[in-house]
Image (cartoon, rainbow, N blue to C red):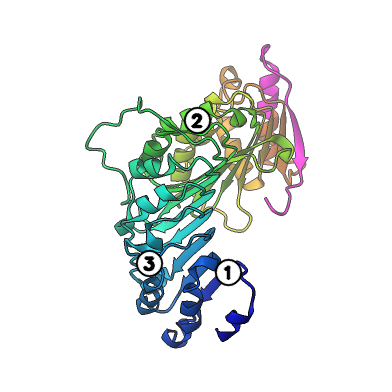
């Protein structure tokens, strides 16, 4: 560290990663010496893997303000069950120059709200893998970010479904919403109650991308999230829906058709393993949210190539019909072979009088690796023929689809 004295006063980037395989306490001397140059440090990235004693030694030297600090990332190792305690005096309780804050697995940080209230130049806030012991309520989050008028990206992720807001008092949908004028990205992982309480309290007129992961539950009441979509102008032009069934989750992504605007996307993931639960959850979400979007024209439903679901023989055909029901404006339907084999029997159960109840605007069906003959081909031909006999229905064509490798 003696070499620091010969350098001109340039902004310093402090990166520290301690190897849990070696004795780390003696190796912290250099980073401690660097952190003492508080007035010159612009970026700090600390990944503490070994023990809490290392963190305590580092935290002890970070009790004063870092006036030009713009980037701060703190990440302990959750595998070591290390309790990372951040004292109230951390950074002197103020970070006016901070632009990006990333906190992973932070157990105890009671002064976080005060620190955020001082970070008025914050652009990116990531609170990731929040344990239940580090729970922060939606009300506190919104209070903190209400002063962050430059905030463009907000990510919250909870470890456990136990981290949910107190619903002892009935939820009041008429809450006054806080305007976040610059926010373009919202990421969240947790329970629906928390998501609902959060989005009911904010207005995000420039939002163009979201990535939401919900823990599995029987009922997905996301009325406030639906209202957020309805209030967001950029989401009204999303016209493509992609559904992917995985081993342990189902993912629905709304985006512009053909990917004309790469950054614009709404992704909703539901964590659950049983395929019938996945279909039930997806049907609830789609029936609640999608009627607010009248521009949807393309729908693909595929099983994952690399982590496919565990197909069950007891899935009722009505579950597939309920899944397709809210897509009333879809013109193009894309199905992987695994999904087509299961959708076909559901369509077969429809009487001729009801064939237009499912996907009434449908014009083209694209099936991955469609064979010249077989159950799928036969059933879809019957479906198309029955649709053709309905005066009010549009003609439907069936096509072979070569599914892209990444899908």
Marks 2 and 1, how far apart in space?
A: 44 Å
Q: Earlier in the sequence, mark 3 or mark 2?
A: 3
Q: Position of residue 74 (x, y in %)?
A: 46, 65
Q: Is residue 207 above or below residue 14?
A: above
The residues tagged by marks 3 and 2 sit, at their Cα atoms, a distance apart of 47 Å
Q: Which one is in front in this view, the residue at disc 1 or the one at disc 3? A: 3
Which residue lies under the disc numbered 1? 13
Of the image marks 2 and 1, the number of the one nearer the N terminus: 1
Q: Which mark is residue 116?
A: none
The x, y position of residue 19, in whole percent, is: 49, 81
Please report whichever mark, 1 or 3, sits nearer to the chain's N-terminal start.
Answer: 1
Residue 254 shows up from this direction: yes
- Farthest residue, direction top: 391
Q: Which mark is residue 289?
A: 2
Please report the bounds of the magenta region as a residue range. 382-407
Select label 2 or label 1 by which is in front.
Answer: 1
């Amino acid at each position: 560290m003696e070499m620091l004295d010969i350098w001109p006063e340039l902004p310093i980037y402090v990166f520290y990663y301690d190897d849990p395989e070696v004795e780390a306490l003696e190796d912290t001397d250099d980073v401690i010496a660097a952190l003492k140059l508080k007035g010159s440090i612009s970026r700090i990235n600390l990944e503490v893997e070994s023990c809490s004693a290392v963190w305590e030694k580092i935290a002890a030297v970070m009790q004063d303000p870092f006036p030009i600090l713009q980037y701060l990332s703190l990440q302990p190792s959750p595998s070591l069950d290390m309790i990372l305690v951040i004292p109230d005096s951390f950074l002197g309780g103020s970070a006016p120059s901070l632009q990006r804050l990333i906190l992973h697995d932070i157990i105890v940080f009671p002064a976080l709200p005060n620190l955020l209230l001082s970070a008025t130049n914050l652009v990116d806030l990531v609170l990731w893998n929040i344990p239940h012991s580090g729970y922060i309520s939606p009300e506190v989050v919104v209070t903190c970010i209400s002063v962050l008028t430059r905030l463009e990206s907000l990510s919250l992720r909870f470890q456990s479904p136990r981290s949910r807001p107190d619903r002892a008092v009935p939820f009041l949908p008429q809450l006054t919403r806080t305007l976040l004028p610059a926010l373009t990205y919202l990421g969240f992982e947790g329970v629906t109650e928390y998501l609902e309480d959060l989005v009911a309290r904010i207005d995000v007129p420039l939002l163009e991308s979201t990535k939401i992961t919900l823990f599995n539950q029987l009922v997905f009441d996301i009325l406030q999230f639906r209202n957020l979509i309805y209030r967001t102008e950029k989401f009204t032009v999303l016209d493509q829906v992609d559904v992917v069934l995985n081993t342990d989750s189902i993912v629905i992504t709304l985006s512009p058709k053909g990917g004309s605007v790469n950054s614009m996307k709404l992704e909703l993931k539901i964590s659950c393993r049983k395929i019938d639960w996945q279909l039930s959850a997806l049907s609830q979400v789609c029936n609640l949210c999608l009627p607010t979007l009248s521009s949807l024209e393309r729908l693909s439903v595929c099983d994952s190539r690399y982590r496919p679901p565990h197909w069950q023989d007891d899935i009722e055909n009505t579950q597939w019909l309920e899944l397709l029901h809210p897509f009333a404006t879809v013109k193009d339907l894309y199905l992987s072979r695994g999904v087509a084999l299961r959708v076909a029997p559901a369509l077969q159960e429809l009487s001729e009088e009801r064939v237009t109840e499912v996907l009434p605007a449908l014009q083209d069906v694209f099936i991955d690796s469609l064979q010249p003959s077989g159950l799928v081909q036969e059933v879809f031909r019957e479906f198309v023929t029955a649709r053709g006999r309905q005066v009010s229905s549009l003609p439907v064509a069936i096509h072979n689809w070569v599914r892209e490798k990444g899908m």
